[in-house]
Amino acid sequence: MANNATIKYYPVGNGDTSLITLEDSTTILVDCNIRNCDNEDTYDVKKDLLQSVQYDKGIPHIDVFILTHGDQDHCRGFKKHFYQGAPENYSETDKKDGLIRIDTMWFSPMIAEENSNDDEDAHQKEAERRLELHRKKDPKKDNPGNRIKIIGYDGNKDYKDLDHLRAKPGDIVTRFNDKNQVLFSIFIHAPFKEHLESLGDDKKNSTSIVFQARFKNSLYQQDFSTLAMFGGDSDHTSWCIILEKTKKFKNEEALKWDLFLSPHHCSWSFFNDRPQEENPTPKKTSLEVLDYRRNNAKVIASSKKILDDEDNPPHYEAKSEYIKKVTEGNFLNTTTYDVINKIPQPIIFEVTSLGIVKPKKVEGAARVAGGAGLGIVNSPSKYGNGKV
């Protein structure tokens, strides 16, 4: 009997790491903030990943890695924990070190515009290595560990010759790691051409990849079982454009959500400019985005504990605005939702034919070290293409 798809939000403080596992065990990792576990209250994300992914001849591998943008709290640990280089050169030492091979990278050229940390630079270097294989039409370019998809646009035209690898806002992706999915797809919302020009002081956050993950449990379903929104550190300016463009092209289905990962770790920037004291009124467009929630929708804040203080992120007033939309019981914080022996545990949702299953707090000390991933088998073919 096949298991259902799951969405796992890791507790990584002010940062993002989310793992989507499909019925056929395909894994999609969105961002990484893998911290050292020297502190006794830090969850071991790397250990959990090694127990959650599939193995190819003993090599742990993620089917798809999506880096929404290059901030350290979204790519921390990339250089140390993920294999970079030709996949055929993966060594026994790499295996012993538990380096995870990324079969397919989703790469935004916007990230290439501003490099500021070692992990981001390592990600950029690996992406360029793969893109060069495609430019040279290397026979190994489509092998696992060399695959890459370009998301969005680039201002300097460096990747114009690779448009066949590109997915743009408004596109629906149904093929992941060279395999068609019939029960899962992604609608890409951002980044836009408008992002080629600065949208404010924090361009890197504004240019985050934003997408809606869509899940079904059966080919015969008319509607989606679960809709999950991911947006990195995208701010209110980006969401204003998303709302405008999605409605313009009559793609309102792509705005609906059951799970909403609060952008920028529950920062006020989703609602208005910072500081909040100078911009106290939420933008109507941001509030309208939240109005596309479905029944029993939940907001997840991937952040440290949210206190009534001056921190931003996470921001107490932002939390209050989310709670007005979903109620307090449907606002979940990764640091405080489920804690065992002082260690926060991942929040895991199961996708069922009736929608998302409320996360359960499973008893047992084994959770502290990391739990096994859920995954399953389904018949691959293609559903859905183009705009909704």
Image (cartoon, rainbow, N blue to C red):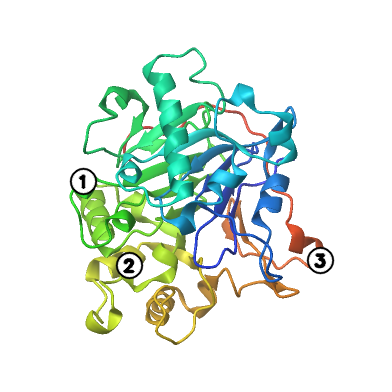
Q: Is residue 108 visible?
A: yes
CA–CA distance between discs 2 and 1?
A: 20 Å
Residue linked to disc 3: 365
Q: Measure the C-alpha gap from mark 3 to mark 2.
A: 37 Å
Could you tell me the amino acid type at mark 3?
Ala
**Label 3 SS:** loop
How would you rate the neighbour count of disc 2 (Cα within 10 Å): few for under 14, some for 14-19, many for 20 or more? many
Residue 10 coordinates in the image, percent (x, y): 59, 60
Q: SS for tag 1?
A: helix
Q: What is the CA distance from the residue labelled 3 to the residue labelled 1?
A: 48 Å
Inspect the image, locate mark 1, and give the three-letter code of the amino acid beneath it: Leu
From this view, report whether residue 310 is shown above or below residue 341: below
Q: Give the residue at mark 2.
A: 270
Point out the image quarter for the N terminus: top right
Query: In which quadrant will I find the C terminus?
Result: top left
Which residue: 64% across, 64% down? Answer: 359
- The answer to whether mark 3 and mark 1 are in CB contact below 8 A is no
Element assignment for label 2: helix
Crowd tier of the residue under label 1, counting other residues whose Cα lies within 10 Å: few below 14, some 14–19, many 20 or above: some
Determine the residue positioned at 43% across, 55% down: 229
N-terminal-most mark, 2 or 1: 1
Visible residue check, residue 374: no
- Judged left or right of residue 164, residue 198 is left
Residue 204, percent from left and from top: 31, 54
Q: Are marks 3 and 2 in contact (CB under 8 Å)?
A: no
Residue at which label 1 appears? 196
Residue 116: horizontal and vertical position, in percent? 38, 52
Q: Amino acid at mark 2?
A: Phe
Nearest to N terminus: mark 3 or mark 1: 1
